[in-house]
Image (spheres, grey):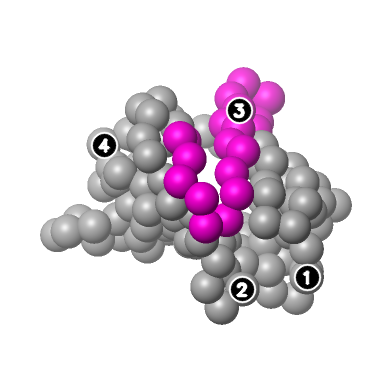
Amino acid sequence: MSFSGNYELESQENYEEFLEAIDFLKAKSAEKMEIRIIQDGENFDWLQFTKSWKWTSEFTLGKECEMTSIKGSTFTAHPKMEDGKILVEFPEYSFSAELVDDKLLLTSVTRGEKGVTFKRCFKRI
């Protein structure tokens, strides 16, 4: 199944706890989050946005690329696909994205003692 589509946030778990664990509580927002994904084979154009913020990334599965974390730092990433999930190691957490019953599920897990699992569910619009 292709990830291509537009999605809006339906539910989330441990949002504040996640932001606190990565020392980025100032990013907390009640604005509606949306995602637009364009997938062309192994190539992805990914946009997450609210009315006042946006994060974009272009990447190819299996190829090294430069990405920007939600805190604004640039890092080298190695996005890959395993068992239908997109996996990316960010500096502060491990990230996965998967499609389940036409919903986009994002999971971010922080490392170390403050291990927090942050989940977001987006419905296709």
Going from N to C along the chain, the mark reached first, 1 or 2, is: 1
Question: Looking at the image, is mark 4 or mark 3 nearer the viewer?
Answer: 3
Q: What is the quadrant of the N terminus in the image?
A: bottom right
Instruction: Please indicate whether residue 124 sits to the left or right of residue 71 in the image.
Output: right
Q: What SS does tag 2 mark?
A: loop
Q: Are marks 1 and 2 in contact (CB under 8 Å)?
A: yes
Residue 33 placement (x, y as % from top left): 65, 40
- The residues bearing labels 1 and 4 have C-alpha atoms spaced at a distance of 35 Å
Mark 4 packing: few (<14 Cα in 10 Å), some, or many (20+)? few
Q: At x 52% / y 33%, what residue is drawn?
A: 29
| Upstream in sequence: badge 3 or badge 1 | 1
State which quadrant residue 19 falls in. Answer: top left
Residue 45 rendering spot, x and y as whole percentages? 69, 41
Which sits earlier in the primary sequence, circle 1 or circle 4? 1
Q: Which residue is mark 2?
A: 84
Q: Residue at x 72, y 66 (%)?
A: 103
Q: CA distance from mark 3 to mark 2?
A: 26 Å
> Local crowd at mark 3 within 10 Å, few (<14), some, or many (≥20)?
few
Q: Is residue 94 magenta?
A: no
Q: What is the spatial separation of the Cα atoms under label 1 and label 2, in whole angstroms?
A: 9 Å
In this rendering, is residue 85 above or below 28? below
Residue for badge 1:
1
Q: Nearer the viewer, residue 58 or 102?
A: 58
- Residue drawn 36% across and 35% down? 75
Q: Amino acid at mark 3?
A: Lys
Q: Are marks 4 and 3 in contact (CB under 8 Å)?
A: no
- Please report the residue visible at 75 percent of the width from the left and 75 percent of the height from the top: 101
Q: CA distance from mark 2 to mark 4?
A: 30 Å
- Residue under numbered circle 4: 23
Q: Amino acid at mark 2?
A: Gly
Q: Which residues are magenta?
A: 49-67
